[in-house]
Image: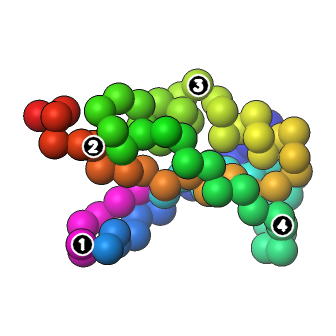
Amino acid sequence: MTYTEVVTAKDAHGNDMSIYVTKPYTLKDKTNLPCLIFNHGGGAVLFSAEISHWYGLDKRFALMLDCTVVMPEFRNAPEIK
């Protein structure tokens, strides 16, 4: 079982972006865990951090590796509009 927190940060252009931070539930209160930054392949036209989270990719990595998984959301390419 995992614990996910969605935090908001500013990107390089000052826009809000979501960051999914997932940890194994048993390690939720630990602060010095290894970290995997999972670039989910979004930012082009398809796919997003939300979809990756929905499919459980971040959860699987967190459980398999006993680490914190950080998955930033990317803005979509102009073609998405």
- Residue 6 or 58: which is nearer the viewer? 58
Q: Residues within 10 Å of mark 3 (few under 14, many from 20)?
A: few
* Outermost residue toward the left in this view: 81
- Residue 78 or 3: which is nearer the viewer? 78
**Circle 1 residue:** 13
- How far apart marks 3 and 4 lie (CA) works out to 23 Å
SS class, disc 4: loop
**Circle 2 residue:** 76
Which residues, given as a range, are shown in magenta? 13-18
Q: Which of label 2 and label 4 is nearer to you?
A: 2
- How far apart marks 3 and 2 lie (CA) works out to 19 Å
Relative height, residue 12 to residue 47 (above, below): below
- How far apart marks 4 and 1 lie (CA) works out to 30 Å
Residue 7 image point, x, y percent: 47, 62
Please report the residue visible at 78 percent of the width from the left and 45 percent of the height from the top.
62
**Circle 4 residue:** 33
Label annotation for residue 55? 3
What is the three-letter code of the residue carrying label 3? Tyr
